[in-house]
Amino acid sequence: MAKVRIWILIVTLLILGATSCSRDRRPLDARLHAALSDGLRKYDVKGASAALIFPDQSVRLVVSGISHDTVPIRPGMLFAIGSITKNVVAALVLQLVEEGALSLEDPLNKWLPAYPKVDGAITIRQLLAHTSGIYMFWENQQIWEDLKKYRDRVFAPEEVLAYLKEPHFPPGKGFRYSNTNYLLLAMIITRATGSSLSAELRRRFWQPQGLANSYLSMEEQIPDRLAHVWGDNFDNDGSFRDITYLPRVSHESITYGSAGLFMTAEDLARWCHLLFEGKVLKPSSLKEMMTIGKGGYGLGVEARVFRRGLMSREKAIGHGGGNIGTMAYMWYLPEHRTSIVLMINAFNGKCINYIAKQLVTITVEHLSSRNSK
């Protein structure tokens, strides 16, 4: 028994010591910048942009590294946000449900014609939650070959659906993440509104909320403020080069409602904060969105837990995404009413996860120390 008490005491002292040693007395901005720089250096990524919004609505913008040549990353640079687009599209669908234009239980065949390998009985709710079972078009190697073969060609949604194979399971009988779900949702939105996806996003979200740095690829002209992106342009040749202006029309045309948005870190953080603070959807709709089901997924949102040391965990809700030569994270910490957005200009999951964990830790420590004063 005495030995057990001694070990408990040792472990406790180690934890307390680690906590004490981990306290960083540098100003918040310096700590945030160091976190970005550390991750970029560790994983050999060129640049990063981050934005944080705190409960008092104060905003911190942090950048590190370069876009290209000697041009530094700047807060006003645009990044492709990849699958975080799904969160915005889901919010638009839920607004249409609030207006009575759609129902979450509407079947696909109420809005769209029949397509091979797509069950017309699948509901809008199942599309939003990735419980439709529909095949993910990216999983068909032929689409990759065709995108590379015809890089300057626009692929219409109906053409993309031609790459589908048999469903993975009957509707509602499982969870499998599939961009096809949000391609179909974008098509339903255009049918229900008689408008384009980009026009509805601008009318409903960007203009009313003052988010002037948000653009849908292929439907809108994206300003020449892009953070340059680095990779191999999906050639799988092991190269790592500036691929920003290489032909990519075919790929961009396919992203559409599943991954087509470009935003600055600040605009995405403001979107995140507005949404999860209840400024975009009615409380009942936001509750629907944030109800986590199969696969740790709600309606256009992912749930995640960040571990901070041995004893602490931070719950987060939001979404991650990637595109050609870029990755992005958008997380809201409900217990701290704080939003964190991070973007890097390479497709490197280890890098973005490493930095994101540090940003969460620094943020929570900052808020805790501020609240204790």
Image (cartoon, rainbow, N blue to C red):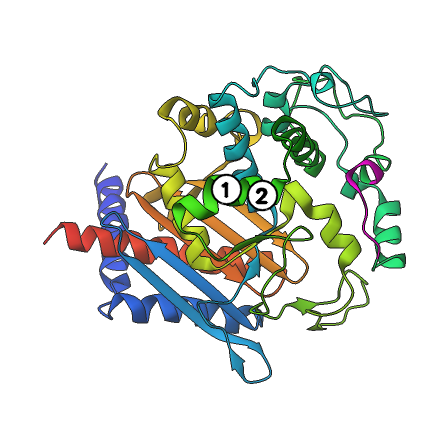
Q: Is residue 197 visible?
A: yes
Return the x and y of residue 260 as percentages of the image width and height.
64, 49
Return the residue at label 2: 199
The secondary element bearing badge 2 is classed as helix
Quadrant showing the N terminus: top left
Name the one closer to the observer, 191 or 91. 191
Magenta-highlighted residues: 153-159
365 is within the stretch colored magenta: no
**Marks 1 and 2, how far apart at CA:** 6 Å
- At horizontal 48% and vertical 59% (from top left) the residue drawn is 264
- Is there a contact, CB below 8 Å, between mark 1 and mark 2? yes
Return the x and y of residue 219 as percentages of the image width and height.
66, 50
- At horizontal 18% and vertical 55% (from top left) the residue drawn is 369
Return the x and y of residue 150 as percentages of the image width and height.
88, 57
- At horizontal 26% and vertical 55% (from top left) the residue drawn is 365
Return the residue at label 1: 203
Name the one closer to the observer, 337 or 43. 337
- At horizontal 85% and vertical 38% (from top left) the residue drawn is 163
